[in-house]
Image (tube, helix red, strand yellow):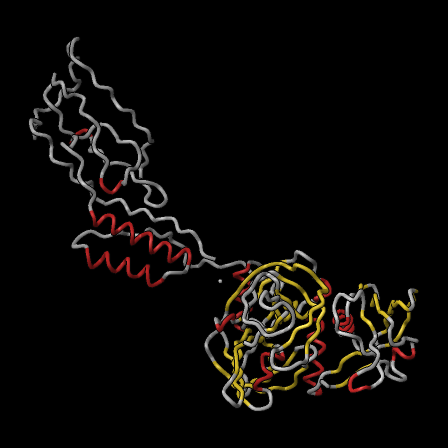
Amino acid sequence: MSTENEGNEGTAVPSVPSVPSAPPVPAAAPEGTPQAGPPAPEAPPAPPADAPTAPIPMATHQESPEPSTAGHEPYPYAPPPSQQQQPPAGSAAWPPPPPAVPAYADGGSSPAWGAPVPSEPEPPRKRRANGLIAAVAVAALVAGGVGGALGYWAADSNDSSSSSGSTTVAASNSPKDFKREAGTVAGVAASALPSVVTIDAQSGDGEGGTGTGFVYDKEGHILTNNHVVASAADSGQLTATFSDGKKYDAEVVGRAQGYDVAVLKLNSPPEGLTPLALGDSDKVAVGDSTIAIGAPFGLSNTVTTGIISAKDRPVASGDGSSNKNSYMSALQTDASINPGNSGGPLLDAGGAVIGINSAIQSTSGGGVGQSQAGSIGLGFAIPVNQAKNVAEQLIKTGQPVYPVIGATVTMEEKTGGAVISDEGAAGTPAVTADGPAAKAGLKSGDVITKFNDTVVDSGPTLIGEIWTHKPGDRVTLTYERDGRTATAELTLGERKGDS
């Protein structure tokens, strides 16, 4: 699991060139065909009985008052009856053969009957092919958002290599007053983006990174991850840039390494700040829609979507610069989260914050550590209910307060529970004298298997569950000792500051 300090390509459908406003000039008539014949009789005379007859091709399309140029092939042009050239009555060439398919039709619908036939088909015109390539390139640019240089080159080469002719890409006309509904992803993003900032943290030695945060209150407090600002917390420079490009200096109000939460304060905050609404992470359900906003790999104001994949997921993550980890009982989402998204909001479908995007699962190295791996659909967010409690503590006192049971547990995973160690840090007792665990009768070697109704499979899982509560909360622990299962009730104690 890793924390970060701080892309779908569509298949383009070629656009069809517009139908020219004037009919194409018919090819020259074959030799022997009169250029101007006598007026056609009202009805052609019947051919002699021994004269060969030519089948009359049937039209394969229905006439439309206005041929469409978007998404359909244009109809071949046929001159009106009054302009058709007809041979003298009784000629064996009557009725005339069908016309050749116009060059702009690209082999479209079946030919219509009633126009002169060229002596031989015209070779394809190069400028038409170039025009089609340009149209395809432009469409790919719009649909996929990739290959900008290639698309521009294709369009430019068409302009420079063709002496005449052009290609028009049809575009639908959108109403000028079109507005997205508030409940759509576009509506939620438009409302939330002005309250999301890109954080640039530069340490005193010039190192740093990019992360995300969001407006917590109208006083200018910004909520983010601790690992986003840790490098510049003591000596360095922090700036917050809004979606409109305005940048403000900021300073750290307080940070909690264990929770991976930090609060910044904008220097000279602008008027009219709009805090993001906070939701209730306890009421989130698996399958609920999610929207993540952040600056993945420095790409500010990026919006991605997904769902809640799981709840209460035990996550231990490191910032890569120390041997201290953060623990959370996280919301898991498949919304795309990458380095730079950390500290940004995870929103529900209504636009309320339900979590702070904090970590992603990495396939490089497996386990705790720094990684620049991209999203594989496994992202984790601190539940906003927990983040809110921590933020209020930091704003009031500048330091975090952690609930504790007064016992040291091993950090090994897949042990079937949280095992109380033989001794604590620096040789201290594993069970603190007169602490909550000691008062409840717990001893070294006991294996805690449940915290209230949540199954505990390791030490990190237990810590993550404890930290979703507050000091003074009454909880029930289920544990195993010498093959026997027992329960104990205790009141959570507290620890101030990061140790």
Q: Is residue 277 visible?
A: no
Percent coordinates x, y for residue 296 in the rendering: 52, 70
> Between residues 459 and 18, which one lies in front from this camera angle?
459
Quadrant where the N terminus sits is bottom right
Q: Is residue 204 above or below residue 62?
A: below
User: Where is residue 151, by image quadrant?
Assistant: bottom left
Tell me what residue is drawn at x 78 percent, y 87 percent. Answer: 426
- Asked if residue 384 lies left or right of residue 61, the reply is right
Q: x, y (%) of residue 429? A: 85, 84
Left or right, residue 222 beside residue 131: right
Taking the image as shown, residue 492 lies to the left or right of residue 65, namely right
Which residue shows up at 27% across the image and 40% down it?
105
State the count of labels: 0
Position in image of residue 40 (x %, y %)? 13, 23
Q: Quadrant of residue 116?
A: top left
The image position of residue 42, as x and y in percent, is: 16, 19
Image quadrant containing the C terminus: bottom right
- Seen in the picture, residue 420 relative to 484 is either above or below; the reply is below
Decide if residue 496 is in sight here.
yes
Tell which residue pokes out farthest to the top in this image.
49
Taking the spot 19% from the left edge, 57% from the top edge, the residue there is 161
Res. 272 image quadrant: bottom right
Residue at 47% of width from left, 80% of height from top?
Answer: 246
78 over 170 or under it: above or below = above
